[in-house]
Image (cartoon, grey):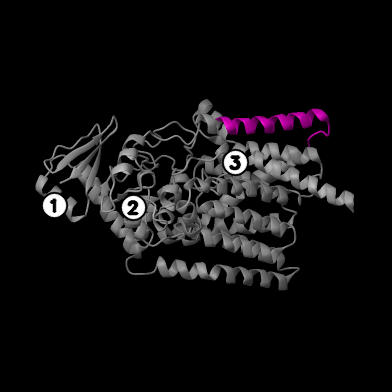
Amino acid sequence: MHESTSGSRILTVEAVLLALAFAISHTQSPLYYSNQNQYLLHAAASAHYGHLAGDWLANTADPTPLFSLLTSGAFATQPWLIQPVYFALLASYFLAVRWLVVTLPWFPNSWLARLGFAALFTAAHAGILRWLSIQAVGVDYPWYLQSGLAAQYLLGPGFQPSAFGVLLVWALALFAHGKPRLACAVAAAACWFHSTYLFPSGLLVAGFVCTLAPTRARAAVQAGGGALVVVAPVFLFTFSQFDPLNAGAENALSTLANVRIPHHCVPARWLDRVAGCQLAWVVFGLVLARRVPFGRALTTAAAGGVLFTGVQLATRSDALALTFPWRISVLLVPIATAIICSAVASRFSNNRQAERVAFALLVTLVAGGVAVTALGLGYRTVDESGVYNFVRGTAKPEDVYLIPTSFPKVGSGRGAVSNTFAPPPRAKEGTNQIPVDLQRFRLATGACVYVDFKSVPYAASEVQEWHSRMTFAADFYSNQSRNFLSDHTALRMRGITHVVASRSQPFEAHYLEEVYADDAYIVYRVE
């Protein structure tokens, strides 16, 4: 009994240490990076961070209220507390995957197999290998071993609502360990943090239920019913706040799907050779796991995703596109990677040399993660600290800043690339990537912004207002023959007190007083 307890403790310590190695190797972004500028805004405003309580977008319907509630505590104390939370999520993800693969019949319960799997699976996520891939060939190929289709993912660069998709991995592991009721409840709980998981969570629960039904019909009904109970409040909230069936929804849905996030919603933007390779990778993983219950459940979920993706391709429905029937791939791809890594690790020769190689690889990946973080090799953005520091120090609660923004000229190229480890500036005209200039403006300064392209509301009427604001901003910055009187009136009517301009495209107008300038930007006060 004592030996069993001691062995269990050793395994626990081992698992935690390997999880920490994974989280360090993965790396994470600094605060206010990419999608964080959208999803942290409501939390910052509710915590009275800066003057954001008066920002227009911060007063629109919050699509992720539970996430905002949890995150507002960090903004009320120290925003950097967000980062250790994400570190814990990264470690949790590894622990869930490790717990899952031990149920595979070919995976031996040996130190070498566990170490080998940890090294291989960590390598598929390691920041240093992603950076090296960019340096070598200009493309972040390792990213496609962990991300789903359509530029969607579970983990991503930093803390945001989608990271709670880790709960889907835990649900799969729970199912693999014979806990179907809890598995379905946990899968449904992911939707509480981000309603974008409604479809993939539903497909996964359907996979669980269909796998159980032939032999354990009662448990299948209980598990499915429990999931419905957990997810019901999310359905009610989503339809009450963002009703896709109301009169103005059609235009709003089209704006979101075809203007704001076509890289997520339009299959023509992402269904290419790379996506084909990812799908082949998933099929290979599912074939390997075909004889285990969780493999059959995943196959059912994947089939559902394929079916509804086909329906969307046939109907070209914006509403269906915005449910992301292909988002189940954010679970399928990394789990396929885990299955394949476990199959490779199980074949390692049980000798000291193999152990040394696996250990050396893992240590190298950890050192690489430290180097990426310490040397700033990833998550790089244009240096806009000068203008941010000025605005942070001078902004007042009633100030509203108009920043340079426009609708991007979306090209026909691929819209699902990862630029996390590419040098700035990342977005180029004519691509499917969105502009990155000044996207950190709100959170970095605490000042109110009139509109920007990166951050968008989701309720129909608010999407229409966002599009109207974007149109005004794009017209204002592109207007070559200015009507000074009408422009001044338009700015005053919209409550805009300051205008930010690129240094290369300054304004000359009697109603604009220059109050700040650096090598990149000029800030004007509207008189």
x, y percentage for residue 194? 50, 58
- Viewed as shown, does residue 8 lie left or right of 75? right
Residue 338 vs residue 355, the one in the foreground: 355
x, y percentage for residue 220? 69, 69
Kindly report which numbered mark, 2 or 3, lies closer to the viewer in this rendering: 2
Residue 334 vs residue 436, the one in the foreground: 436
Element type where label 2 sits in the image: loop
Q: Badge 3, how many Cα within 10 Å: few under 14, some, many 20+?
A: many
**Which amino acid type corresponds to the residue marked 1 in the rendered image?**
Thr
Q: Badge 1, how many Cα within 10 Å: few under 14, some, many 20+?
A: few
Which residue is found at the position 56% from the left and 57% from the top? 305
Q: Tell me if residue 57 comes above or below residue 135 in the rendering.
A: below
Which residue is found at the position 70% from the left and 58% from the top? 174
Which residue is found at the position 53% from the left and 48% from the top? 153
Element type where label 3 sits in the image: helix
The stretch of residues the image draws in magenta is 346-371
User: First in sequence: mark 2 or mark 3?
Assistant: 2
Element type where label 1 sits in the image: helix
Q: Quadrant of the N terminus?
A: bottom right
- Viewed as shown, does residue 64 lie left or right of 148? left
**Which amino acid type corresponds to the residue marked 2 in the rendered image?**
His
Kindly report which numbered mark, 1 or 2, lies closer to the viewer in this rendering: 2
In the drawing, what numbered circle is on residue 30?
Answer: none
Q: Tell me if residue 321 comes above or below residue 350 in the rendering.
A: below
x, y percentage for residue 30? 48, 40
What residue is disc 3 on?
A: 145
